[in-house]
Image (tube, grey):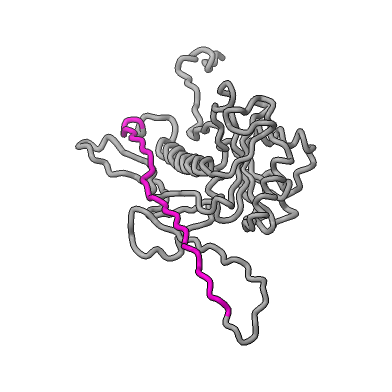
Amino acid sequence: MAITGTSALGGTVKAAYDRYVEFSLRSVPTFRTAVDKKPVAQAMPGSSVVFSIHQEMADKVTTLTEGTDPTAVAIADVTQVSVVLNEYGNVVTHSRKLGELSFSDVDPAIANLIAYNMSSSLDVVIATILAGGTNVLYGGDATSTVEIVAADIITGNDIRKSVAKLRAANAAPKYGNLYAGYIHPEVAFDLRSETGAQSFEDVQKYTNSSEILHQATGVYGGCYFMETSRALVLNDGAGSIPVYRTNILASQAVAEATAVEPGVVVGPVTDQLMRQRPLGWYSLQGWSMYREAAAYRIESSSSVA
């Protein structure tokens, strides 16, 4: 009996496509965990939010004299930090025809892309704010960004020195007695190479598993480290080599003000035949360095670059 199979009529058999579309390789948004100073009681709506910082009084260590009133001292002026609210967002418009004819589920795929773009974009904004901090250490023998050469990689001493500076400034740690470290994977490689692969202690020794943050690498030198590919890298070293920014942060290093929380927005269909649909994300927010003494940045090269 003759059987007509797929080999005979191959032109009528088409490939089957998975309706689920995979996405590009992604890192987990990390830098928003650096933000822990937000308005408690905003007086009124406005285009900016002003935070106030009281300076500590000087220690009074001399003894009082019986029968004599102590001399009153003046309280120092309040330092103010203003955070400007700005609009952030992105949008795509896809056609009805694409939705009708595509082999994949278009709406969920685009919503996924939009949501990731939102979190990724805001992460980069905060990383850029941190790169504007005034307390900087440089890898190797460099004394400025433009002097950094390929040999000026990070060392454990750079981490310990940053932590010592924060403790000396009475900057409050972020996680128990630990400061937060945000480090590029290629810089983390150099740190492990110098200190030994086992020098990073398990984060579970310091916090329970439900509190462990995304990208958590371990604990070293008084820092709870998170690796992220969004740690800022600019080609601004000697000869335009890449310079990596590693951030060591205490509490209240960065302030955030929010009028509209970031979220996905499905826009209205406005064309006459209802053939186009906008989908995007939007937020009305702002960030600024809050306590400069609570942030140190280490600028270095990497042997992996």
Q: Image point 49% across, 33% down: which residue? A: 21
Residue at (33% x, 59% y) in the render? 45
In-front residue for pair 31/43: 43
Rendered image quadrant of residue 49: bottom left
The image quarter in which residue 246 lies: top right
x and y percentages locating residue 95 in the rendered image: 32, 32
Instruction: Report the magenta residues as a range.
Output: 70-98
Q: Residue furthest bottom?
A: 67
Side of 196 where 260 appears, left or right: left
Image quarter hosting the C terminus: top right
**Residue 52 appears left or right of 86:** right
Q: Residue at x 79, y 37 (%)?
A: 196
Side of 231 where 114 appears, left or right: left
197 horizontally vs 269: left or right: right
The picture quadrant where one finds residue 46 is bottom left
- Is residue 79 in view from this perspective? yes
